[in-house]
Amino acid sequence: MGKNVHIVSRPNGWAVKTAGAERAATIVPTQAAAAAIGRQMAINRGSELLIHGRNGQIREKNSYGNDPESSKG
């Protein structure tokens, strides 16, 4: 499983940041645009996307990893 992707508020927009990285992968004007980029990164890595609100709290969390529990039918 790859490193989780975080969407965090910045003074100049919204940053798409990989867990443990010093710098953001990209900064875009809107949270929606950052979430779209981050979602694709998380899907490609099989990791989680965590979207933080302006206050820093996680407001949404989506997992794109191989979760054996969710594949039971």
Image (spheres, rainbow, N blue to C red):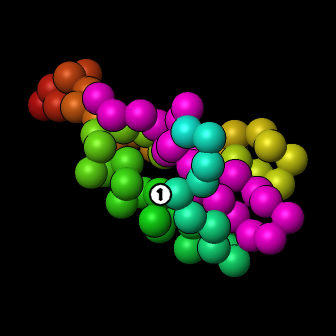
Prevailing secondary structure of the magenta residues = strand
Crowd class of label 1 (few under 14; some 14 to 19; many from 20; radius 10 Å): many
Residue in the image at 37% along x and 54% along y: 41
Q: Up-down: is 26 above or below 68?
A: below
The answer, for residue 16, to whether it is visible in the render is yes
Question: For numbered disc 1, what is the local secondary structure?
Answer: helix
Q: Position of residue 58 (x, y in %)?
A: 69, 40
Q: Which residue range is magenta in the image?
A: 1-20
Tell which residue pokes out farthest to the bottom in this image: 29
Q: Quadrant of the N terminus?
A: top left
17 left or right of 49? right
Q: Up-down: is 26 above or below 42?
A: below
Q: Up-down: is 67 above or below 5?
A: above
Q: Position of residue 65 (x, y in %)?
A: 29, 35
68 left or right of 59? left
**Quadrant in the picture for residue 13:** bottom right
- The answer to whether residue 7 is magenta is yes
Disc 1 marks a residue whose amino acid type is Gly
**Disc 1 marks which residue?**
38
Pick the front one: 1 or 73: 1
